[in-house]
Amino acid sequence: MKDMLDYSKLSNVQLDLFEDKPGYAALIMEEFIRLKHYLKLKTLKGNIDMIKKQFRYHLETSENKRHELEEHNLVCKFTTKKTGTTDYLSLNEFLYDHFGQLFVDMAEVKYEKIKDNNELLELVKPYQNPVSFFCAPAFNKAGKELIKPNLNKYTRLGMEELATSLNAVLPKAEMYDSQYEELKNEMMKCSIIQTLAIETDEKVKKDLKRLLKHKYGSVSLRFNKPTYDSEEIYKKLGADFLIQYSQPDAKLLKQNIMKGWIKEKDVEKFKTIHDIETEFTVMRLDVDRRIRTMYESQLIRYSLQRAN
């Protein structure tokens, strides 16, 4: 694409940390906005959401929960999702009592459960994994005006026209989304971002943040929530700590249920359901079929493993 960012050229103007001018991350974010890539991305994603809303409007009264549009390689489907709360303390006690090491393998110490207790934070500090971080944009008045999308309504379109419109928009949205991911990875290379990630002096940090401002706003450094080595915590602090302050990793728990090692009904009894929501999804049919095939293959493989 002719107006794509050329990072090799922009990196040549990477500025010294001591110069009172925008750094590399700010420069490339400003360029991404100036070229209207961010606006195009927001507009395309917004239009996709509008098309999906119209699909739902057309299909909501149908008794069928799955609608395949074979000629357009699309599928629209309604699925139910239970929302509620889980008694993790009791679930953890059950998992540890019955499965021991398997509980430890699934346990994730939750920062939210210990963040207000300085004593606990100090206790787990030796077992904290390296902190990860990412770059996020912030927009000033000029920036907000420049990225404001003008969305289509799609209100008068039938199913066929909606499908055609969605297939026209999806590849462009994926292209700009890929560009934005590349931009975020590129911003992480900025020496100011990397220095800011390890700097502890508040005055220095304030000075560095000034170098992340640009014409349309600024780039900010965001830290992900801390994570911890549960195995080491178990060895040094014992099972009680994990039972009190952890939750099972959702993916690992689901995997162990699929393998037949843990019964789903034994996990469900620790959940209190408050509501059942209906979710609506529109996606490419070939992708949906591939996901379903992979899921079914996993079930067969796990079933064979149990038999052996």
Image (spheres, rainbow, N blue to C red):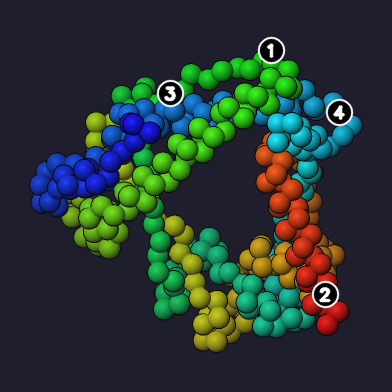
State which mark lies toward you, 1 or 3.
Answer: 1
| Residue plotted at (44% across, 73% down) | 128
Q: Earlier in the sequence, mark 2 or mark 1?
A: 1
Q: Which mark is residue 156?
A: 1
What amino acid is at disc 2? Leu
Give me the C-alpha separation between circle 2 and circle 1: 51 Å
What amino acid is at disc 3? Lys
What amino acid is at disc 4? Ser
Q: Secondary structure at mark 4?
A: loop
Give me the C-alpha separation between circle 3 and circle 4: 35 Å
Q: Which residue position holds label 4?
A: 62
Q: Which mark is residue 304?
A: 2
Q: Secondary structure at mark 3?
A: loop
Q: Earlier in the sequence, mark 1 or mark 3?
A: 3
Q: Residues within 10 Å of mark 1 (few under 14, many from 20)?
A: few
| Residue plotted at (41% across, 78% down) | 126
Contact, mark 2 vs mark 4 (Cβ under 8 Å) = no
- Report the front residue among 232 and 202: 232
Give me the C-alpha separation between circle 3 and circle 2: 54 Å
Give me the C-alpha separation between circle 2 and circle 4: 38 Å
Contact, mark 3 vs mark 4 (Cβ under 8 Å) = no
| Residue plotted at (81% across, 67% down) | 300
